[in-house]
Each structure stands twice: as structure tokens, then as C-alpha cells.
Image (tube, rainbow, N blue to C red):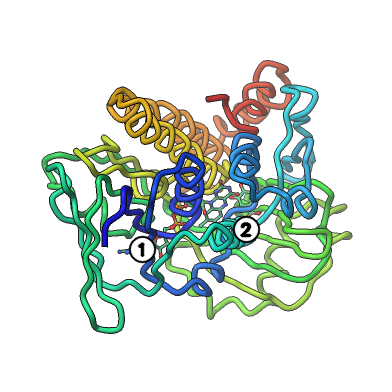
Amino acid sequence: MRTQVAIIGAGPAGLLLGQLLQKHGIDNIILERHTGDYVLSRIRAGVIEQVAVDLLDEVGVGARMHREGLVHDGTQICVDGARHRIDFKALTGKTVMVYGQTEITKDLMDGRAAVGAPTIYDAQDVALHDFSAERPRVTYRVDGATHEIECDFIAGCDGSHGVARQSVPAGAILSYERVYPFGWLGLLSDTPPVSQELIYVRHPRGFALCSMRSPTRSRYYIQCSLAEDVEAWPDARFWDELKLRLDGEARACLVTGPAIEKSIAPLRSFVAEPMRFGRLLLAGDACHIVPPTGAKGLNLAASDVRYLALALAEHYHEKSAAGLEHYSARALARVWKAERFSWWMTTLLHALPGSAFDHKMQLAELDYLFGSHAAATAFAENYVGLPF
Ligand code: FAD
Ligand code: DHB
């Protein structure tokens, strides 16, 4: 088999890149380790920036998102029982879209099927070859048989545990990491959300987040220890702990119900540089992770593949290498801004094992955020997404 771009991974980064390349008339094949149903079963992001909304529109898969997604003009932050509102629309003129990653993935899969572009699911033992030379290759196994794809470029969109980044020689890549000493226990339920807007909660018992997927489906998270086992959290225990962290009004409005999904995610900041190695280009969680607090991961994956698709279009249609040469630096400039914001928001809102001084700094920082127009504007600008 031969294609122009072999894409590893059918998460949001791989699928969106595939659609953008189709739009530019560039052939691509996606290889995904899991089944399509498995990919759709992972409950993750919920908040989409305008730039990601625009990209989904650009590739023609935005219609359902505009019908079913919820436009949010602001968010609430609750500190030790008192609620504060950050008005995105008033401060920046922009809003965010609440629409689940699962739905985006499904819309992208349907869009890909509609144009007949190939995705090979259940591809095992994917291996990358010769990406520092002119003719890279990718090998994989399906049903026990080995196959090979010859290509011009390999796009590593295979998430944080993928094979693409690991294929780069250790001396060619630098990584930066911060592991936080806690995780998020998330619960999805078919119950109405506690509020029309998301509520980020800072409480001495730990962070909590009240989010949603629709007017009838809620998503909640609570900060938990890394040693926690999801089996030790029957639904009733989750709801009891959440209630302890909410303000009185939210507690009174909370509707509980059986969990549809419950899982624990560790929190980590991670960046691997650069994002290009010859004809291998990394994008999304394959080369950077943010703690979920700032809702930036999927949005960064979208902005990476926008830069990457433009660079590949320049290569094929204008015979210019400039876009590819600048891809890593352009994408990383945006990545580090999102890393900063996600690290800052995580530090601001979680119960930290630090000193009494750290705790006082957290409160002073929050006081500044709620008391200063400039600080609230900076928060809103980062949350709704910086321009390209
Ligand atoms: P992934 O979604 O991880 O996709 C990678 C794909 O590659 C997977 O399908 C995987 O199966 C496949 N793959 C892996 N290895 C191989 C291999 N060897 N061969 C072939 N295929 C392979 N982001 C936001 O923007 N907003 C939010 O509100 C938000 N909330 C979040 C909440 C939680 C609890 C979590 C955990 C994350 C959240 N994120 C959020 C982050 C977001 O989910 C990720 O950043 C996003 O999924 C990254 O997309 P990706 O395509 O780069 O990687
Ligand atoms: C969701 C996740 C986040 O990390 C966040 O900051 C906001 C919302 C969510 O899953 O709904």
C-alpha cells in the first residue's frame, strides 16, 4: 500500500488531521490500535474553544455540534463556599462550546466514512521505519497478517502512550514533566446539570468540577489521591464527597443518579520537543499533556493539526518546505502557553500538600483574580483560547 501521509491514531488529532488533509486533496490512511467502539467509549474532554469549533466547521462536521452543543458565555469558580463568575463574553467577546469529545470523535468518524477515506482499526504492532530518509514506511498486523504502508510522511497522533514518540532516538528528543500528587475521579450520569454553567470548586477537601454534556447529562470530577481505586467508590460515596465540596445552592440543586461511567485520570504536565523528526511529525497528546483543569488538551491537539495540515498543503501544493520547517516552533509556542495556563489553574484550585505559605499564596492569587479586571481578563482570554 502507498499513501502520502500515514496517520497513527484515530483520536481527535488523527481524525481531524485526516479530514483537513482530505480537504487539501492529500491522501492519507489512519491506523488505530483499538476498535472504533473502544475509541468512542473513552469519556474525556467537554469544553471546546472557538478555534476548534471553527476547524470542525471547516472540515464540514460541525452541524450536530451547533445543534446539540451548549454555548457558554462564562464559568463559575467557587472558593470555600463562595461563588464568583468569570464572564468570557463581556471580557473577551468570545464563548466556549460544551460538546463531548465522544461526540466530536463520532462526527469526525462519520465525516471520514462519508468521503470514503480509509481507517484501519485493530491495527496491532504498528512500527515506524525510515522516517529520517525520503521514503518512510509503517508496518502493522491485522488478524495475524503483517502489512506495510509506504508514505511520504508519518503523523504521530497516537496519544501519550503511543509508539510514534517512542520511535524517536532518545538523544533527539527532550522532555519536560511535572507529575501532580493527585488525580481526578470522574463520573458521568444521566441527571440534569447542577447549574447552567460549569462550576470549578476549590475546597479544603479537594478540587471538584461540575460539568455537563447536555441539559440531561452531567459530568462531575473530584480530586482524589493517586492511590485511589475506582472500585472503592460506589456511586453513593462519590455523591456524598461531591456534596461536601459544593456550596449550599449547588448542593440543594444537585440531582444524583446511577453512574454511566466512572474513571480515574492522573494529572500530569508533559512536553516533548521538538515535534518534527525528519518525515515524522507529532501532534496532540503524543507530544504534550496538560492537566485537564484548563480544558486545553483536545484544543491543543486541534491547533497542532491545523498547523500541520497547512504545512503539508504548502509542501504538496506550493513545493515549499517552510511550513514543515516551522511546524514544531509554531505549535510549541502555543503549547507552552496552554501548559502555563493549565499548570497555573491546577495549582490555584487543588488542595496541595504544600506549606501554609503555599496555601496563603493560593488564596491571595484567587483574591487577585476576582478583584482585578486585568486578572479576570487574562483568565478569560486563556480559557476561551488564544488566537493563532
Ligand atoms: P488520544 O485521544 O489519546 O488519541 C490517540 C489515539 O491513538 C487513540 O485512539 C489510541 O488508541 C491510538 N493509539 C495509541 N497507540 C497506538 C499505536 N501504537 N498504534 C495505533 N494507534 C495507537 N481536553 C480539552 O481540550 N477540553 C477538556 O475539557 C478536556 N477534558 C479532559 C478531561 C479528562 C478527564 C481527560 C483525561 C482529558 C481531558 N482533555 C480535555 C484532554 C483530551 O481528552 C486529550 O488531550 C485528547 O484526547 C488528545 O487527543 P489525541 O488525538 O492527541 O490523543
Ligand atoms: C470537562 C473537563 C475539563 O477538564 C474541564 O476543565 C472542563 C470540563 C468535562 O469533561 O466536561
Residue where numbered disc 1 is placed: 31
Question: Residue 134: which numbered mark, if any?
Answer: none
* SS of the residue under disc 1: strand
Residue 277: % across, % down: 21, 39
Q: Residues within 10 Å of mark 2 (few under 14, many from 20)?
A: many
Residue 137: % across, % down: 19, 56
Type of amino acid at the residue the image marks with label 2: Asp
Q: Is mark 2 within 8 Å of ligand 1?
A: no
Label 1 to label 2, Cα distance in Å? 18 Å
Type of amino acid at the residue the image marks with label 1: Leu
Residue where numbered disc 2 is placed: 107
Q: Is residue 151 left or right of residue 34?
A: left
Q: Please report the residue visible at 47 percent of the width from the left and 28 percent of the height from the top.
A: 337
Q: From the viewer's perspective, is residue 331 above or below residue 202?
A: above
* SS of the residue under disc 2: helix
Q: From the viewer's perspective, is residue 9 above or below residue 135?
A: below
Q: Please report the residue visible at 84 percent of the width from the left and 49 percent of the height from the top.
A: 196
Q: Quadrant of residue 321?
A: top left
Q: Is mark 1 within 8 Å of ligand 1?
A: yes
Q: Residues within 10 Å of mark 1 (few under 14, many from 20)?
A: many
Which numbered disc flags the more N-terminal residue, 1 or 2?
1
Q: In the image shown, does 171 or 240 lie closer to the viewer? A: 171
Work out which quarter of the rendered image holds the N terminus and state it.
bottom left
Query: Can residue 355 be seen from the camera position used here?
Result: no
Q: Please report the residue visible at 38 percent of the width from the left and 26 percent of the height from the top.
A: 330
Residue 280: % across, % down: 25, 44
